[in-house]
Amino acid sequence: MVSAKDPLQSAFKLVTHKGAYQDMPDGQVRDTRKTGPVSIKEPRNPVIAFLSPPAIFAAVTLYGAEKARQPWWKTFWLGILAGIYLSLGCALAYAVGGQLPQLQSTNLGAQRLIFGAFGLPLGLGLIVICGAELWTTNLAYLPAALYEGRANLLQLAKNWFFSFFGNLAGSLICVWLIDETFLFNTPAARVYPLYIAEEKTMGPWGNEVLRAFFANYLVCLAMWQATAAQDIIGKIFGIFFPVLCFVAIGFSHTIANMFWVPFAMKLGSTVSVGRYIGSSMIPTMVGNGLSAAFFLAGSYAFCYGTLPLRVERMWLRLRGKTSSDPNYQDASFVRKEGVPPSMYSDGSSHDNKQYPARYSGGVPPEAVASNEPLEAHNAKGPVVMPQQATGQYAPQHDGPAHAENMV
């Protein structure tokens, strides 16, 4: 029998017929039906399959801060790569789902499903896994960093400007190169690209804004899910379904249209450059920006970040007043080199425990104010703040208990 005193042996006790296994020295068991000992494997630490929603927003904030600090040439070059990657996905969609005219006339839903599944998910997957700067996802990443005080408006404008024109350059390069292959030169191969170009440029301005709103909302949700996943298969699945959804429904994405419409123009479409810019590019830019910067990034900054605190401070300054709360100055830190908000993967950070509700970021203010790594700060145990002497509040966090939950 396996000794009950050793929990490791008890946990890995092999259950079989009587007499098949015998105890051996140094944590091994012998299978009497074999000649050699069978070593007991030590248990592994659990693998985090995906991040919690607060941890996703914290990671997005960090990514946004890194993008904000990039030099302009790096953003521009990675933007070119993103335009090429997404254009390759668009070309795949044309080559597969766009070459099914019989299916389109008999079963439009199946044709749209195939058109959405084979193409754009590949392009966004290449951008996420290989690395590139996609303007439409930067519309969410940079505002998230801005809301948390990790980027400023100048950095945001610089990133958006160079990533946009990098995407445009990469898309036009891909349009020219793929057209030179003459793979879409047959009359049958031209039908669907010409149809897509007309569809993307003939709708009213308001309709295009709404289509773009939902398109980039789904694309940014795909990036959120890819950020949550901790393995490559999880990232691919996190990207696949939201992108499939937006393409199959027919929503409008600014960077995808940079390939779809100009490529159709190369194939002989009657759409002009002015019509493309006025009826497609500008309204899709507006819709993409509204959904990513305000609806998505703003919502999660409000729920998991310090945006409510910043709004409160702005309101008090406009009124010319200061907070009567004695903890107000401690809570009004700006996260620059400290730990981003909501870093605990299980959502059980210091908020709703020892700290007042206004510390919703999940990091003790004294740790951030000192720019000290959170693990080292927690290892010190309970912290005595100056306010304790006056009895205003007494924060006492439970030392390193939370360190294992860091992501």
Image: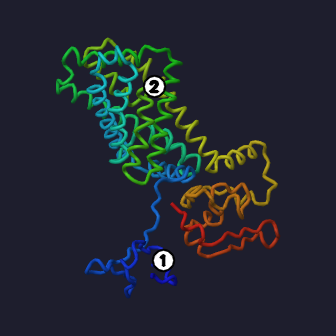
Q: Is residue 217 above or below residue 48?
A: above
Instruction: Report the coloring of the rendering.
Output: rainbow
The image shows residue 24, relative to residue 131, as above or below, that is below
Q: Quadrant of the N terminus?
A: bottom left
Q: Which mark is residue 329?
A: none
| Circle 2: residue type | Phe
Among the two numbered marks 1 and 2 on one chain, the one whose residue lies closer to the N terminus? 1
Report if residue 168 is visible in the image. Answer: yes
Residue 47: image location, x then y, percent: 45, 61
Q: Is residue 272 visible?
A: no
- CB under 8 Å between discs 1 and 2: no
Residue 280: x %, y % from top left = 43, 21
The residue identified by callout 1 is: 10
Q: Secondary structure at mark 2?
A: loop
- In the current view of this chain or complex, which residue is farthest to the top? 270
- Residue 219 in the image: above or below residue 195: below
Q: Position of residue 248 (x, y in %)?
A: 41, 26
Say left or right for 228 vs 125. right
- x and y percent of residue 178 in the render? 22, 28
Q: Which of the 4 image quadrants contains residue 199?
A: top left
Q: Is residue 100 left or right of residue 295?
A: left
* Viewer-side residue, 23 vs 248: 23
Residue at image location 56% in from the left, 67% down from the top:
374
Q: Which tag is nearer the camera, tag 1 or tag 2?
A: 1
Indicate the secondary structure of the residue bearing disc 1. helix
Which residue is at 45% across, 81% downward?
2
Give the number of the disc on residue 251. Answer: 2
Question: Which of these two is toward me, 187 or 206?
Answer: 187
Q: Is residue 51 left or right of residue 108?
A: right
Nearer to us in this view, 392 or 166? 392
How far separated are the C-alphas under marks 1 and 2? Answer: 57 Å
